[in-house]
Amino acid sequence: MSRSWNRTSHVIVGAATALAVLTACGGGDDNAKGSQDKPVTITFWGWAKGSKEVVDAFNASHKDIRVKFEEIPSGNAGGYAKISNAVKADNAPDLVSIEYPMLPEFVSQGSVQDISPYVTDDVKKKFLPQAVELTTLGGKNWAVPFDASPQVFYYRKDLFEKYDVEVPKTWDDFRKAAEKVKKADKKARIGTFFPDDPTTFQAMAWQAGAQWFKAEGDTWKINTTDAATTKVSTYWQGLLDDDLVHNNASFSPEWTNSLKNGSTVGYLGASWGAGVLTGTLPEQSGRWAVAPMPSWDGKPASGMLGGSTFAVTKGSKKTEAAVEFATWMTTTEDGIKSRIASGTSSAFPAAAELRPAAKKAFDATYFGGQDIYRLFEDSGASIGRDWTWGPGTGTTNTVIKDQFGKIANGGATIADAVKAGHEATVSELKKRGLKVEG
């Protein structure tokens, strides 16, 4: 199944050189594992659906390592700040969940360990090449990849049929469908703009062919004002100005309630979003379906929205045990089955050989028996090839999020927010002593 993903295998190629000078941090002092008599206990922080079930399954089947799990807010909702603060205070857990976009930031800040000695070739070959590349910076491995996350469009099949709305194949179609939904029900909207989540907007810019970060030699080139990004900004500003989409924080009570009462009939998300819907709206089983993301020309195209990795914090002295647990979560059928069987996860593994197990474990009756994992596979094959995440993503996203929050009252536009994010990122990277053009 990995054949169709090979097109994206150099997503982050080129970033290695620019990050090499930032990746000198070492591992823990004591990497011993426990024994049956004295198991080593590691702590793990994360927020992905099904994590508790995975930890329970691991603890039930392993004697030499015990995992203590703490659920934290998702990264953009405060999880990353909590991890960063814990690292600074020298009381961080051993293992943390970090999405691909933020990994270069944590590496550049020296917050995570080089785990290269524990990520063997046998482990690497289980993952798709691009998943390994997204977690390899400066020639070193900094995290164990877990899932891939191609964009898809979830929609209320019953309401689309009721309103006589066709599933959009292009962004022009999407706007026409949005107009039709609003006309059919003045309170209903086809989707939501998430002011708190710049990564959704970035994924759409990625899908359009944008390339915000580019590493050439020891220089970072930053460009968020290219034609592709401008097109996406203008398009979404138009949807907001014409009140064709809601403007609610992601996964907020407002957003959830709008799904429950049918005033939101679509969700532009990613592969993991299927688990969000099944876990949040179990009573709507059979009413939802999944389609490819609308594209600008009607041809398959996708960005990647999120996607998780597991990294060992710099202060941990239990590196070997932490990596063993992370590897079990990401490369074994027991690991993926225990997560998806929770009924709240639709993880699309970066380890291609586990996708049949994931598909089998996921109860597709929620989506009317639709083969959503085949759709995920096809969407993954259409991910744009040229997007790279830079070491200043935290700054970029914080500033854009702040500006997005002003859009509702007219205090900013999407274009204003992207421009502010660009300027703040350039300033931050220069402050860190990096060479920047942009």
Image (tube, helix red, strand yellow):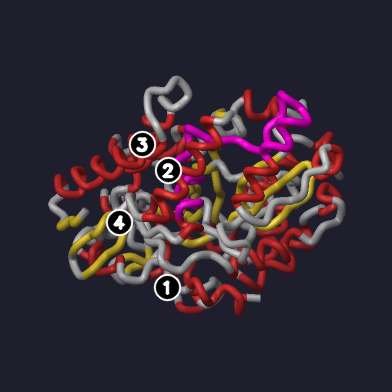
Q: Which residue in the structure is indicated by mark 2?
A: 93
Q: Quadrant of the N terminus?
A: bottom right
Q: Secondary structure at mark 4?
A: loop
Q: Which circle, 4 or 1, is nearer the viewer?
A: 1
Q: Residues within 10 Å of mark 1 (few under 14, many from 20)?
A: some
Q: Amino acid at mark 2?
A: Pro
Q: Secondary structure at mark 2?
A: loop
- Marking on residue 288: none
Q: Amino acid at mark 3?
A: Ala
> Is residue 177 visible in this depiction of the protein?
yes
Earlier-in-chain disc, 1 versus 2: 1
Q: How far, Cα to Cα, is label 4 from label 1?
A: 34 Å
Whether residue 251 is in magenta: the answer is no
> Is residue 38 visible in this depiction of the protein?
no
Task: Give me the residue at 37% from left, 41% from top.
Answer: 397
Q: Which residue in the structure is indicated by mark 4?
A: 29
Q: Residues within 10 Å of mark 3 (few under 14, many from 20)?
A: many
Q: Are marks 2 and 4 in contact (CB under 8 Å)?
A: no
Q: Is residue 103 left or right of residue 29?
A: right
Task: Give me the residue at 42% from left, 43% from top.
Answer: 93
Residue closest to the eye, 195 or 21: 195
Q: Amino acid at mark 1?
A: His
Q: Which residue in the structure is indicated by mark 3?
A: 417
Earlier-in-chain disc, 1 versus 3: 1
Q: Amino acid at mark 4?
A: Asp
Q: Which circle, 1 or 3, is nearer the viewer?
A: 3
Query: What's the magenta region?
Result: 178-205
- Marking on residue 10: 1
Q: Quick one: which residue is furthest to the top in this view?
A: 409
Q: Are marks 1 and 3 in contact (CB under 8 Å)?
A: no
Q: How far, Cα to Cα, is label 2 from label 3?
A: 34 Å
